[in-house]
Image (cartoon, helix red, strand yellow):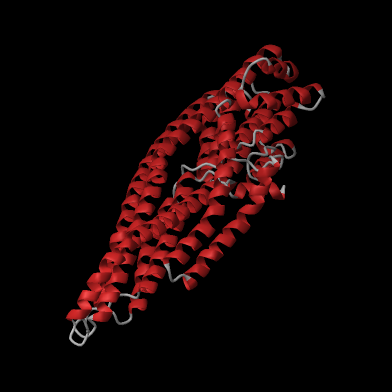
Amino acid sequence: MERREITWLKLSNEDLVNTFMLYVAMLGLSNVSVKQFLRTVSISENLPVYMTKQFQKACALMERWSYGLSEALEYLSKHLREARLKNFFVRLTHSLKAGVTFEDLARIEYNKYLAEKANDFEKGLEKLRKLVEAYTTLISTVALLSVSFLLITTVFGDGSEQFLTISLASIGATLSSTSLLFATNTLRRKVLNHYGGVPKKIITLNMATAPLIVISATVLLVGVLLVNSVWSASTTLAVAGLPLAVHGFLGRRFKKRVEASEASLPLLLKSMGDYMAVTGSLNKTSHLLTLSDFGQLNRLVHRLEARAKAGIGMLISLKMFGLESLSSIGSKVFSMLGEALEAGVKPTVATGILSEYVTSVIMNDRRRSQITASLKTLSLPLHATLAAIFALLTTLLTILSQISALLSPQMMFIRPVNPYTAVNFFYTVMVLTAAITAVNIYLSDGDTIYTLTQYLGTILVISSATYLAMSIASGSLLTSFAKLTKGVSGLVPGGG
């Protein structure tokens, strides 16, 4: 029980209301009594413990203390935490007194909830679209800000390191403020469940996630203190980023397989409901399901048949099916289906509602992905461009420093930033922007931690390769300017 409470405390209030309304629809539209509805919800493992305890108390008031249904509903309207659930039981109490059946009220409430949910999703989608556009614009201005700070530092050379520190803080504060906005995104959904029977390589990836992030972060932070050349900056970025990129790539490949199995869930649920309505048995239903093709779920369907033949109960069999799908939505709907069927819900009603729910979730994921895809796609060339500009500036500052050293009496007011200090500044900006971009991509998707590691690692590696390649290419300019610097030295009084 404690573990279940901890797990559900991580869920949002919207998730709880959504689960509750699915129970309302399944039980209400099957013409189940209100008392049976309360009993089913009171023992549900898909709702938090603090909520089910209140339903258990309401059931105890009716069964042990002879309270009426209206008094039990009034108790729930006063003691539940969620305002929307409080209001639901107020409406339920008044509707029953007015002669409205629970079935009619359930249909009205569920349809209203779906309409409100669709409206909220559209608002959230528009908000996310604006955030993505704003952040990509900010990333493109980081190079301009960096150049501006360096020019000001060149003119006012005294205290250049302090001024660059202030500029870093300004860039970091500006970009990181967007992460707070991305964190308010309510459209993200966890794809994977917490079932322990995942492939061993995924268990290894999960165990390596935290140490890998800590090690890479340590390498990057130590680099801030030690990096003083293009080679050291590029090497540090690559060493920290490459393991993260590989980790994220392997993890997201596994996540895509789970998403592919989710696509077969609506059809499987509908077929299961139709077969159960005809056969009235999970054993016969599971056998008939094995004769159809459900893609990556075929293996799990055969396991379901084996459990049914072994005499394992329907509730446990369906819950295990959901867990073995490795999908969070799969484990949720099959657990709810098992509880609903145990409560006497009509199979076609339950599977129809859950199938439509899964379909809507998948469609919403696709619409959200269309928006976040622009952030993912643009982030890579934007950071590559940023690294290329920094490489060119490093070369130009090196040349300017040589010329300034030769003309120091005449250029006493122009004090270029030390190239080593500039490299450290550019390195820090690249690390900062890469980390914030990866976090924002993760917050906009919110599916798995593999999204964070893959994009953070990929951006670091791309920045490293671009910074080094462009530095080498632009370094050839130093050769052409060598004669110029010698010529300038000949023009300086006393310079030969």
Is residue 164 depicted above or below 306 in this figure?
A: below
Is residue 262 depicted above or below 189 in this figure?
A: above
Instruction: State left or right for residue 14 relative to residue 167.
Output: right
Locate residue 42: give its quadrant: top right
Q: Residue at x 67, y 15 (%)?
A: 291
Q: Residue furthest right?
A: 310
Q: Residue at x 39, y 36 (%)?
A: 119
Give the image location of residue 239, x and y in percent.
53, 59
Instruction: State left or right for residue 206 relative to residue 468.
Output: right
Residue 223 seen anywhere in this rendered image of the structure:
yes
Give the image location of residue 258, x and y in percent.
59, 34
Residues 55 and 451: in front is 451
Q: Residue furthest front?
A: 496
Residues 62 and 370: in front is 370
Locate residue 21: give its quadrant: top right
Give the image location of residue 385, x and y in percent.
34, 53
Residues 405 and 138: in front is 405
Locate residue 284: give its quadrant: top right
Give the image location of residue 79, x and y in percent.
59, 47
Is residue 461 depicted above or below 76 in this figure?
A: below
Residue 98 seen anywhere in this rendered image of the structure:
no
Q: Residue at x 25, y 73 (%)?
A: 152
Instruction: State left or right for residue 353 relative to residue 121.
Output: right
Residues 459 and 418: in front is 418
